[in-house]
Image (cartoon, grey):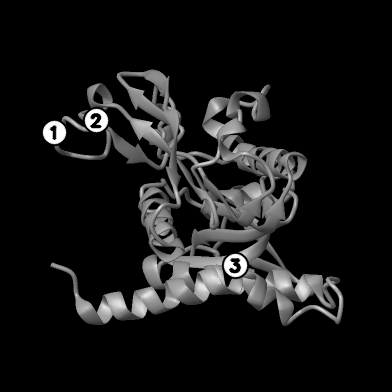
Amino acid sequence: MANSIFMNIYLQKLREFVNIFSNDSESIFKAHGDTLIHPGEFGKYREETTKNILKMLLKKSYGIGDGFILTSKDTVSTQCDIVIYDNNTIPLIQENSVNFFPVETVVGIGEIKSSLNKTQFKETLQKMAKNKALQFERIKQKRQQESDCFNEFDSICSFLICDDINFNLQSIDFDEIYQGFDIALRHNCILIINKGCFFYKLTKDRIKGSFFERQSEKELTYPFPVHIEKGAIYPIKSAILLNETSREELAGFFFHHLTLGIEKCIIHSFHLSSYSEYNFEEYYLQDN
């Protein structure tokens, strides 16, 4: 049974979310013509609304910001509209209001866009895949180093939210978009508010080995592009959920699966010495 108070508050947040992506909201930032007066501020407006939904749904141990991802190998990502990170370790590194996040603490990244054409859609997903690839530069704990296979939860969740696309949803070819990328670097979830959602479909022969700890004869939507079973990596088939009911319900479905995936992601330990040119482990205290 649903809780009426929670649902009323949640539905209000979802309505605010979809309305801010609407043309009416965009008109606030436009002059007499169709030119945005402050496109950067309008983008921030949408990003903050998305963050507020995530803050409502995720545990307080997760921080939600924006900025760049760092690795101990001196690699820096491009700018991420949304970064979800472990708030219990080093939360972030700030320099002149710019945020930097050690990759070990990052569990999610997102891009927030308005309307995209086919080229922009492809470029946005490829940008996320390149940023997500920094997960392979994380410093793993000893027990993780000794693992003999990739864990689908040992990854960063990536997601795209946009208002609309100006091409046929059914024409999207993810194999072509991600050509040359490891399949584990593909998006986890995509929300196109005016058209539908992209997830993955876990077939009944794979459900038993997934984090759905129950038997089922149905195919289930899954927030990961791969599934690991007995050391073998199985690509998961992409699935579309079309917007046939309401934009609020579609957004609610999207956020449910996104947060489910984020909370399954493994958080790694941050070690200051790995990011510094000083080897602090070589320093020892001496008696006076």
**Could you say where residue 248 lies in the image, as x and y percent from the top left?**
42, 65
Question: Given the image, on which type of amino acid does mark 2 rest?
Answer: Ile
In the rendered image of this protein, does residue 58 appear above or below residue 80? below
Residue at the image position 28 percent from the left and 75 percent from the top: 7
- The residue singled out by tag 1 in the image is 215
| Among numbered discs 1 and 2, the one appearing first in the sequence | 2
Q: How packed is label 2: few (under 14 Cα within 10 Å), some, or many (20 or more)?
A: many
Residue 176 in the image: state x and y as whole percent. Answer: 66, 24
For the N terminus, the image quarter is: bottom left
In whole angstroms, how far apart are the C-alphas of marks 1 and 2?
7 Å
| x, y percent for residue 120 | 75, 45
Q: Which residue is mark 2?
A: 207
Residue at 74%, 41% in the rendered image: 123
Q: Residue at x 41, y 20 (%)?
A: 233
Give the secondary structure at mark 3.
Answer: strand
Gap in angstroms between the C-alphas marked 1 and 3: 37 Å
Horizontal side of residue 184 vs 222, given as left or right = right
Residue 65, label in figure = 3
63 w.r.t. 38: above or below: above
